[in-house]
Amino acid sequence: MKYLFWGSTLLMCLIFAFSAQMYLRNTEMVQGFFTQLGYPSYLVLPLAALKILGIIAVLSRKSKMLTEWAYAGFLLDAVLAFAAHWVAQDGGHMIAAIAIIATVTSRFAYGQYCLNEEYSNLTT
């Protein structure tokens, strides 16, 4: 379970880190994409910041609540990206589908591996 957790978590974090750096480095281009996909362009920079903070929350595992919110945010972002790219028929839906699978797998493994590890540490 440990390998499943770390593999899916690293894949998820890489996808969202790539997305965040693209939002920060090519803001005007990404704002154009957002407009074409029907989303407001002012969301680009806040989403980049939230993706970076989410990665920190998931990898640090300091707060269960922040980790859960990060997973929820990543899943919502990936589902909305999938839907927007699917409707636009631009082919971008595949990376969003991979992000959805990685996020769900990481969250499942987090519950099985990390939370059980914390529980077993409390009982010993």
Image: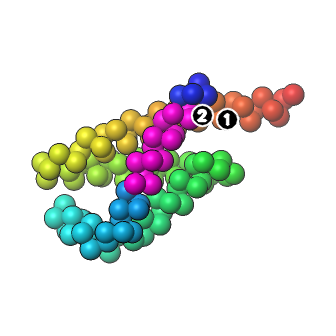
Identify residue for label 1. Answer: 115
Q: Residues within 10 Å of mark 1 (few under 14, many from 20)?
A: few
Residue 15 inside the magenta-drawn segment: yes
Taking 36 as reference, is 19 above or below it? above
Which residues fall within the magenta stretch? 5-18
**Which amino acid type is marked by label 1?**
Leu
Which residue lies most toward the right here? 124
Residue 111 numbered tag: 2
Q: Quadrant of the N terminus?
A: top right
Rendered residue at 58%/55% (across/down): 56
Image colouring: rainbow
Q: In this orientation, does residue 37 appear? A: yes
Element assignment for label 1? helix
Rendered residue at 82%/34% (across/down): 122
Report the side of 29 relative to 113 (left or right): left
- CB under 8 Å between callouts 1 and 2? yes
Report the side of 79 relative to 48 (left or right): left
Q: Residues within 10 Å of mark 2 (few under 14, many from 20)?
A: few
Element assignment for label 2? helix
